[in-house]
Amino acid sequence: MPDTIYLKDYTPYPFQIENIDLHFELEESRTRVTARSRWQRRSAGPLRLDGQELQLAALRLDGRQLAAADYTVDADTLTIAQVPDAFTLEIETIINPAGNTALEGLYVSGGNFCTQCEAEGFRKITYFPDRPDVMTVYTTTLIAEQSKFPVLLSNGNLVAEGERDDGRHYATWHDPFPKPCYLFALVAGDLDCVEDSFTTRSGRTVALRLYVRSHDLDKTAHAMASLKHAMAWDEEAYGREYDLDIYMIVAVSDFNMGAMENKGLNIFNSRYVLASPDTATDADYVAIEGVIGHEYFHNWSGNRVTCRDWFQLSLKEGFTVLRDQQFTAAMTGSAVPRIDDVRLLRAHQFQEDAGPLAHPVRPASYQEINNFYTLTVYEKGAEVVRMLRTLLGPELFRKGTDLYFSRHDGQAVTTDDFVQAMMDVSGRDLSLFKRWYEQAGTPRITVERRYDAAQGSYTLTLRQSCPPSPGQERKLPFHIPLRAALFDGKGAPLSLRLAGEAAPAGTERVLELTEEEQSYTFVDVKAEPVPSLLRGFSAPVKLALELDDGELAFLMSHDNDSFNRWEAGQQLALRVMLRLIDVLHSDGRPALDGNFSAAFARTLADGTLDPALIAEALTLPAEEYVAEFLAVVDPQAIHVARQYLRRNLGFAHREALLDTWQRLTDDGPYRIDAAAMGQRRLRNLCLGYLVEMGNDEVRSLAMGQLRAGANMTDVMAALTALVHSGAPERSEALAAFHARWHDDALVLDKWFAIQATAPLPGTLEQVKRLAASPDFNLKNPNRVRSLVGSFSARNPVCFHAADGAGYAFLADYVCELNALNPQIASRLLTPLTQWRRYDAARQTLMREQLERIGVLPALSRDVAEVVGKSLK
Ligand code: 7ML
Ligand code: ZN
């Protein structure tokens, strides 16, 4: 078992580093790194530095070469027992970037050098205190062969460059802002650059540069536009201006995560940079804008104000995700992104919160920090900051963020410091609120409603509870903001006056639940209203409000909160699906629910609604979300029920679906604004329902859309519909797509993913064939995710095949990747951690695979932690 690191053991580092000079003599398999740094003691103790997989070539203290007796080196530390109170340290290490398949530290991707240091990759470059509270000023010199690596980049501003007479050249970069080493970056390679500029509101001009391989130059416009939008939005919404004269983004094709906010030099997975209408879907365009925003916003929430230790990861990530969500909402002007975020949270974060790896937004311990870049830290963390905003209101919240940024600029701080700033500007006591950071698990709220006609009063009694999670048997009540409204029989919102109040205060209130049970009595209520609670998903909880089918249908058409209108439809759909699953389990005959079908038709025909919201409303709850409501998950039954409903809704509303598909056919120029995207979304949703029915005529429409190839959104929708419905044309369609796109890695990823997610018998065999094809590459994380990840995390019915073949397939890849890229191995493993949710036979099969992985020789810390906690 790997060692466990505890939050309670935090101690400040005993030294301060004034600055560091880094020199890189770049060679693919033998790079020499010289680090010269100036130190000052702050408290007693030896000098201990982190370092892994380094060959130590020289070690000098104040210019004197240290003797072997002066220091000790083991697999992850270098310790010098005696150092003066102020000194200069010079360390030379040799590393092998070409042999670095873990993609952490300095590595080679597509022939170029790049780095990924968050969380603990810098220790694979040189010996250094690899922790975020040690901040210093970096000057970096890169030296490399000019012909192969014409571009040499690092953080900050270029201060010198030149040629040497041996065919090599150099560049020196200086970053004036002290930073932790996880924000260090360098890039060296043969890249082209698109350039633009942004003038900040105080009038400074910032050079914007986007570096890509030359054949990708035509796919950079959207990323550049997104960056400018993000810079303007952060000035407007948070008063945050950019602080260096240059902002660079580099796209690389081998990257473990989405992107990285290195100061002044973001490095991106190319999938979050490159887009053209031919190659990227609408969802890709939206994701690119969001990720560009996310990394840009880190310049303040993460870089200027950083984390004291990795337990505080959500300080920067939760807050920055909230910021990128607000940005996306502002750019699209629609409720769709909020709905999609909640779908993700419910389908996957709720699962994490209920499983063996459940942890609080601010964990108290970890074995491998890379395993804590989770949906809980990111997405639930964003919900927690969003709740603070709901509790304080937008103005006070903004005052709070202003105070936080000014008070802690240049510091490494904690989530407590963030909440303290919110307390200080509002005068509110948020000490109970901090439980959101400390306790894992998804709270459940039940609602009892009582209308008293004689008194004209309406009472809501709310009760909260939270199931136990690992290491936390009993939970204290959470401070939960519940946005609430009440509607009269005509669908008008009531003015809300609580008992004891002199006058009503608006038609929407935030009820604050802080105890296990609380009642709220509204007065002047003339008839029993329909309640709309948790509006906009105001807290990451499971709300059990037992509305009847009629009330749900009422809210679907009358609620003035778009999120809750959508939510009412989802609840109705969920109920229908759960009833179907019951019918299937008792060998009964399924039937299409008439009320649900009528509501479906009404929504489809509603000309007043935004097409994107219609599409959201007509998308049935994900199989993973339905699973949340079953005591024992039956992936087969869930899939059959959902499929049954899709097919029968298709039959029942064939004409309307066809009409909508035809009506929304857009022959005009391709646009990527929210309106055009909404139309494509609804149109392609209709196509999906139609093709699911499987008749020749409709399939030929899909083939037509595919062949027309107007844009990747329409092409993917047609191809997915054909492949996932098992249409006879699917092989031909896939072959044509492959022939057209096999040279474009990002498009080929889509081709892999479509096949891996087909909910059909034979998918696993096809996935295995694809894994053996020359297009597959175990060293490329995007490709691995598109095939192995898609199959195991996005194809429940095939992955959970009763014979366990899906589990064995995943385990084989986890075993191989454990040696190559532990971060990717550990992430892929996630679906197996959920084994307790399944029937006894599946439990045994899943556990067998976990055990098999657990006894691998040389098990990485990443995989060991996940397997260990899953089997406990
Ligand atoms: C979240 C990131 C990482 C890991 C990016 C790596 C990051 C850490 C990095 C939202 C949008 C885009 C990417 C990510 C993400 C997991 C997810 N600091 O900026 O958080
Ligand atoms: Zn981030």
Image (cartoon, rainbow, N blue to C red):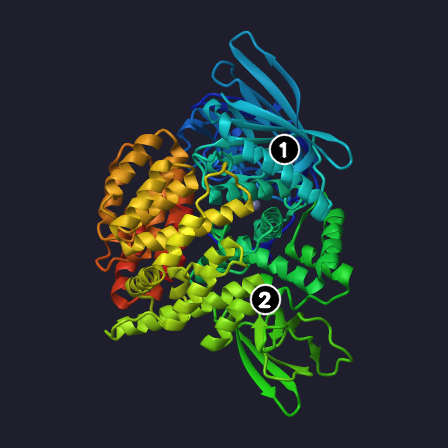
Q: In the drawing, does residue 792 fall left or right of residue 97?
A: left
Q: Is residue 187 above or below residue 675?
A: above
Mark 1 or 2: in front is: 2
Residue marked by disc 2 = 535
Residue linked to disc 1: 264
Whether residue 266 is visible here, answered yes or no, is no
Identify which amino acid the numbered label 2 is placed on: Arg
Which sits in the foreground, 706 or 345? 706
Q: Residue at x 66, y 87 (%)?
A: 456
The quadrant of the picture showing ligand 2 is top right
Q: Which mark is residue 806?
A: none
The percent position of residue 535, horizontal first and vertical second, equals 59, 66
- Say which residue appears at 54% left-offset and 47% top-offset: 675
- Contact? badges 1 and 2 (CB < 8 Å): no
Q: Residue at x 66, y 83 (%)?
A: 525
Where does residue 511 sit, x and y in percent of width and height? 65, 72
783 relative position to 222: left or right = left
